[in-house]
C-alpha cells in the first residue's frame, strides 16, 4: 500500500514509507530512491508482470 501512486504508460511510480517496502524494492529488483523514512520506487510494466 503506497501513500501515493502515479500510473503512466511505462509503469507505476510509488511513494511510500520505508516499512511498507516489498521484497523487490528491498532487494533492489526495481528502481528505488531511498530518502530515509520515505521511499520512491519505479515499477515498469515488465516489473509488474514479473513480480
Image (spheres, grey):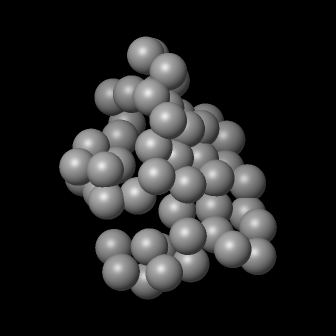
For image coordinates 76% across by 67% down, the residue present is 8
Residue 10 image-quadrant placement: bottom right
**Place of residue 11 in the rendered image (x, y in percent of width and height, measured from the top left):** 64, 69
Q: Which residue is drawn at 44% across and 73% down?
A: 47
Q: Is residue 1 visible?
A: no
Total numbered circles = 0
Residue at the image point whose x is 35% and y is 41% from the top? 21
Q: Is residue 49 above or below residue 29?
A: below
Q: Which quarter of the rendering shows the C terminus? A: bottom left
Picture coordinates of residue 16, whole percent (x, y): 52, 34
Location of residue 29 (image quadrant): bottom left
Q: Where is residue 40 in the image (x, y as percent from the top left)?
A: 55, 38
Q: In this view, does 19 lie to the left or right of 39?
A: left
Q: Can residue 25 be seen in this view?
A: yes
- Is 26 on the left-hand or right-hand side of 16? left
Residue lying at 43% horizontally and 16% vertically, measured from the top left: 36
**Eyeballing the image, is 9 above or below 36?**
below
Residue farthest to the top, as pictured: 36
Amino acid at each position: 500500500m503506497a501513500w501515493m501512486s502515479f500510473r503512466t504508460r511505462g509503469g507505476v511510480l510509488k511513494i511510500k514509507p520505508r516499512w511498507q517496502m516489498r521484497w523487490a524494492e528491498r532487494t533492489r529488483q526495481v528502481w528505488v530512491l531511498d530518502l530515509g523514512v520515505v521511499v520512491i520506487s519505479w515499477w515498469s510494466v515488465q516489473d509488474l508482470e514479473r513480480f
